[in-house]
Amino acid sequence: MQVPYQWLKEYIDPGMSAQQLADLMTLSGIEVGAVERFGPELPGVVVGQAKKVEQHPGRSNLTLVEVDTGGDILNIVCGAHNVKVGDKVPVARPGSKLPGERLIEETKLYGVLSSGMLCSAQELGLELGAEDEILILEEDAPLGVPVDRLLGFDDQILFLELTPNRSDCLGLIGVAHEVAALTGAQVVFPPCEPVESGRQLHDFIQVTVKDSEWCPRYTARVVVEITIKKSPLWMQLRLLKAGIRPISNVVDITNYVMWEYGQPLHAFDLELLTDSEIIVRRATAGEVLITLDGVKRELDTEVLVIADSTKAVGLAGVMGGENTEITETTKAILIEAAAFNPKNIRRTARRFALPSEASQRFEKGVNHDAVLDAQNRAAYLIGELTGGKVLQGLIDINSSMVKPWPVQLKPSRVNKILGMEIAQEEIIAILSKLGLPLKQVDEDQLLVTVPLRRPDLIIEEDLIEEIVRLHGYDRVPTTLPRGELTQNRESMPERLKTMVRNLLVSCGFYECITYSFINPANLNRLRIAGDDPRLRLISVQNPFSEEQAVMRTTLLPGLLKAALQNISYRELNMQLFELGIVYYPQKLPIISLPEETERLTLLVSGLAPEPNWVVPSRQAGFYEIKGALELIFKRFQIEGVNYLDRAEPFTHPTRSAQLLLDGKLFGFIGELHPDVAVDFGLEQPVTIAEIELAPLFSKANLVPRMVPLPRYPAANRDLAVVVSKEVCAAKLEEAIWAAGGELLDAVRLFDLYEGKQVPAGKRSLAYSLVFRTDEGTLTEAEVNAAQNKIEEALLGLGATLRS
C-alpha cells in the first residue's frame, strides 16, 4: 500500500515529517517498509507560459514557441504540436538537467537558436501522455516556479507492509484513523454528497441481486451527459504516487475513491447495458465473458457475475467486461459499489489469474458501512470533474447481516497478559483514540463496540494488542524468563538404551526407526499361531491404509521391510537394529491404555564385515547377533543368560535359540525360515533376534568392577573331547567350571570340528583352560589333579578324550 504523504494530509495532519510518521507507525505495528521521494530534483526546469506559437521558418514539422518564465522570455524550438498560446508548460532552461543526466543547452536547430526545451511528462519521469506531447500544466500554475515543486516531486511516499488482518489500512481514510489514534489529530472526511438533478434514477436502471450470500450489499448511481477526457493533472499525479496508471476521468475517479476508502468501484457504460438492467447472479455453465484485458473466459456456476438482461458484463469484484467498457463515446454511466463474499472473490481471482487492487480488497473484506460513502464520493467527483449530471436517488440493496459487535475487556487481564501496569484511565483513552465506543460495566469490565471498519478485532486479546501497540512496544519492560532449574539428566532406562545403541553401533550395526503401526497380514506371513499373544492386536480406528491398520506387537515386520528396501537398492550387506515399543492390550476390545514394552530387535544379512583387504568377510548370521548381545550382557555385568535350542514359528528349526535369564524366556535368535523369507520377498538368508529390555535393565549393573592384576603366572592346558551332538556346549562348559574348582581361572572354546575323524552323530570340542591362584605358583601336580577332575566330569556326560 503506497501512501502519498501530501494526499494523506488532506484527511489528517500528523504534525510531523513523513519519516517521523513512518517511524511512529512502525513502532506501533504498522510497518512502513520505505519512505521514498516521488520524483527526482529538476534544477532549472520551471513553469512557463506560451506567448506566441509559430511555425519554424525552416521545418514544417517544428514550431517556434515564445515562452515567459516569469521574467525571462525564451524562444524554443519544439517538435510537439499540442501547445497553444496561454498554455502553462514545463520549460527546461539552458544548463538544466533532466532525468537520465540529460543536460539542456542552448543550440541552433535548422538556423534558429533554441534557448531551452519544452518538456513532455515522460521527459520529466512521469508515465503520462505521449512522448511527443508537451505536458500542459494547470492554468493557475505560477510562472517561474520550479516544476518539481509544483508537481509534488518532493512528496514522500510511505510504503506500508500490511499484515493480512489490517485490511482497514488499504485506504487512506483507514490510514488516517490509524494516524489519529497515534497522534490525537482529527480525521477530516472529504465531501461526498453529490448534487442531484434531472430525472429519477429508477427511470433509467433496474437492479436485481439474485445471490445475496455472495453479494450482501449492492449500490448503484447513474450519471448522464458526461464527457470522457483526461483527469485533471492533480488527480493524475496523485494516482501515479499511489502506483496507479491514469486512464480517463471516470476510470481514474473510481481508482481514486478506492484509494481513499479502500472500497473498489466499477463504472459501466449505461447505453451498453441491455434493457438498462443489472442482475447480480451466478454464471451459467459454459457462459463466456471477454474481460477488459481482452481474454475470453469460460465461466461456471461457482463464479459470481454482474449481468444485464441477456449477458454477463463483469466478473464480480475482479474485472469488468469488454462489452460495457468506458470509451471516449460514453455519455452515461452506472457506478457500482458493492460488498462481495471474500472467499468467492478469492477463488475467482485465483482461478482466472486476475489479481488486482480491487480483488485484494474484496478478498480481505470491505467495510459494508463504507460502501455507500464511497458510492456518493465517486458520484460527487464524477459530477464535478466530467460535467455530468447525477440523477436523483440511488439503489441500495442491503441484505448484510454484519453489524458492530461487542467485545468484553477486563483491565486486570490486560495487565496480567502484558506483564505491566497500565492504568484503566489510559486503557479507556487508547480505545477512544482508536474510535472504539465503550461503556464501563463494572470496576473491572469494559464493553467495547467494534465498528465494521476494524474486522480484525474479534476477541479480548485483539483489544489488548491494540492497547499495547498504542501504549508503545518500546515501553514494555524487559524481563528475564523465570522458572525452576531442573537436573537435565537421562533417566536410568534412557541411559541404558543409549549404552545399547552405542555398543551396537560399535559392532557395525545401523539403527532403524520404523512405524508403530503395521499391516496385520505381516503377522500371518510370520506363521504366528492363533493363541500367540502377538496376535492380540489393537486396531487403529482411522488408519491411513491397511499398511498401518494395527499397533505392532513385534518390531520384526518393520525391520524386515527395511531390509527388503535395502536389498531393492542393492545394499546386500546389512546389520540393522531397532529400539522400540510394542503394544499389548490388557483387554479386547480395548477399554484402557495398553501395556507398552521396550524391545530390541536385530537383523543381519549378507557379508560381515563389509569386504575389505585387511579382514576377510564371511556370511553374517547367528553368531554375529549372539556376539553383539553377549557384549551388551557383559557391559551390564549380567550373568545367567542361557540359550535353549528351540525355534520360533518363523525361524529355521535347527538354526535358532531362545534366550533365558534366570530361567525366564526374554527373547530369541534365529535364521529367518526360508519360506517366511520368500513371503517377505527376501532373496538372501536373514538372521534376526528380538529381546525384551526390561529384564536386562532390572539386573544391569553399571558400577565398574576392578580386578587386580595377577601376582603369579598361569598354567595353560588344552583339552579336546568328542561328544554327541545332542549334548550342548553350555552343559560341557558348566561341568568344566564345576570340576575345576577355585584353581580354574578361565575357559574358552577355541575349536569345533565335525568330519571323517569323528564318528557320525558326534563332534569334537576343544577348550583352552587357564589355571591360576593368588596364593602362589601352581605346581605341575596341582594342575594335573585339577585337569583329571575335569576329564572325569566330562566322561560322566558321555564324552571321550580326543588324543
Image: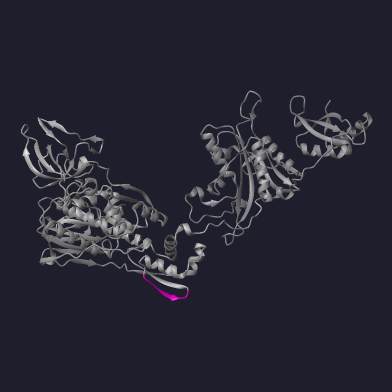
Q: Magenta residues: mostly which secondary structure? A: strand
> Which residue is nearer to you in this view: 548 or 446?
446
Q: Position of residue 313 (x, y in %)?
A: 18, 54
Q: Where is residue 658 in the image (x, y as percent from the top left)?
A: 69, 43
Name above or below for residue 414 compared with residue 2: below
> Which residue is nearer to you in this view: 657 or 192?
192
Q: Residue at x 13, y 31 (%)?
A: 108
Q: Which residue is drawn at 22% across and 49% down?
A: 150
Pick the quarter of the image with the C terminus. top right
Asked whether, in this view, residue 450 is left or right of residue 377, the answer is right
- Give residue 748's quadrant in the image: top right
Q: Position of residue 492 (x, y in %)?
A: 69, 50
Magenta span has 432?
Answer: no
- Give residue 499's quadrant in the image: top right
> Which residue is nearer to you in this view: 483 or 146?
146
Asked whether, in this view, residue 447 is left or right of residue 205, the answer is right
Residue stretch rendered in magenta on the structure: 437-443
The answer to whether residue 212 is seen in the rendering is no
Q: Position of residue 436 (x, y in %)?
A: 36, 68
Name above or below for residue 462 compared with residue 357: below
- Give residue 123's quadrant in the image: top left
Name above or below for residue 191 compared with residue 637: below
